[in-house]
Image (cartoon, rainbow, N blue to C red):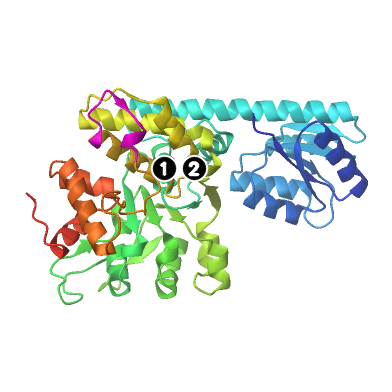
Amino acid sequence: MTVANILIVDDDESMRIACAQTLEEAGYRVQAVDNGYTALEKINRESFDVVLLDLKMPGISGIEVLKTLKQRERGVAVIVITGYATIDLAVQAGRLGVSDFLSKPFTPEELISAVEKSVNAKRHELEDSCIGIALEAQQNSVDVIVGQSEAIRKVMLLIKQVAPMDSTVLITGETGSGKELAARTLHRLSRRRDQPFVVVDCGSLVESLFESELFGHTKGSFTGATDTTKGKFEMAHGGTLFLDEIANISINMQARLLRVVQEQEIFKVGSPLTKKVDVRIISATNRDLLKEISMNTFRLDLYYRLNVVQIHIPPLRERAEDIPLLAEYFFKRLRKTMKKRVSRISDQAMGLLRTYDWPGNARELKNVIERAIVVCEADELGPEHLLLGETPGFARSPETGGGSLADSEKNEILRVLKECKGNKTLAANILGINRKTLREKLQKYSISFDE
């Protein structure tokens, strides 16, 4: 089982050292800070199971830290440690979600007992959350976040805690890690579940059409505007707007977006009138936005507006215990969809899947499983059916050997199309591209559909 991560927050150095030593000897991973500001920064960046929090500190008090944690919906157990215990203080702390209360001085045994109780309660909460989300997804035949690792359980618990709120959410993680799936799960568990979930691919937004795309336009407002149209914000009214890869929009576009996020009202292009919109905004990025801010490529004020709650999706290589579960999940769903007779993944094939580092994360794993099912004519999917370690987007065929990149790409397209019996949608999925890109590649290499 993963070692629990504990944060001690106390301005008394001797207390910090004593608590840290006791908990480290008990087998916990421990960090300690001397003020509330540093504690909140750490909690925002890292995942902690339990926070030991002193209430009486200079600067920001423990109560203020508790209020901030509650506002941010951080899924962390808090044990209050204080030498100034009063009934009023205990009631106030209890209303803010404190899991236990230790009055100074306390014994090492009392400290360990309180921490063990909080850690166990947190783990049971994680398990219940995972089961609840999985059952709801199964009942509604939708994709689900799959995993049993503590890292992914914490993600699922945070999603469940944040979903009922209307706070903006920033989802971070590498390409293919499941950011959109996390956003869809947030929407599905929210009060907005029966309203639209609208996706905006920020990487494809053209600056000259940005306002038209997001806010809509009136008839005749520019050349080619033959009708009055709704923008993405209006389409998502009452529901959720998902801004995928938010770091890809320019500074100018960010300024225009900021106003709408703040005011929840839009101007259609060509109209002097404002229109109120009711949307929950979820954003996602695979970049370090704080680094982008330091480079003046992302606005700090927009970052704070979008980052009320942050959910980080850990890469697949950091949760290897989830790989077999994910592989089986994709295998069963894809085999059923593709109507293939292959019945299982062999132990040898699963061993290869376990040891690969998955730079493309869950998306790459899904593509590898899908291709393997396509080419497998046996009852068991074996190592020979797996194509691992290839460049994302286009796998390099072993048969092509050397030659130019263009030749390799053409040969790979031909091979996958042949395997898919000309099914271009399936071929595009296996190649990791969309149908439009595949069509452009077919034209580029003069490949006919029946080739």
Q: Are marks 2 and 1 in contact (CB under 8 Å)?
A: yes
Q: Residues within 10 Å of mark 2 (few under 14, many from 20)?
A: many
Is 296 above or below relative to 354?
A: below
The spot of residue 61 in percent (x, y) is: 79, 51
- Does residue 88 appear in this view? no
* Quadrant of the image containing the N terminus: top right
Q: Residue at x 39, y 56 (%)?
A: 244
Q: Residue at x 9, y 51 (%)?
A: 449
The spot of residue 104 in percent (x, y) is: 90, 36
Point out the stretch of residues depicted in magenta: 375-386
Element at badge 1? helix
Q: Residue at x 33, y 31 (%)?
A: 331
Element at badge 2? helix
Looking at the rendered structure, the number of numbered marks drawn on it comes to 2
Is 419 above or below relative to 244?
A: above
Which sits in the foreground, 188 or 315? Answer: 315
Q: In this image, 401 relative to 443: left or right?
A: right
Q: Which amino acid, by three-letter code, is at mark 1?
A: Ala
Q: In this image, 351 relative to 329: left or right?
A: right
Q: Which residue is mark 2?
A: 316
Q: Which amino acid, by three-letter code, is at mark 2?
A: Leu
Is 313 above or below relative to 288?
A: above
Which sits in the foreground, 126 or 307? Answer: 126
> Is residue 380 covered in magenta?
yes
Q: Which residue is mark 1?
A: 362
The spot of residue 151 in percent (x, y) is: 57, 38
> Is residue 405 covered in magenta?
no
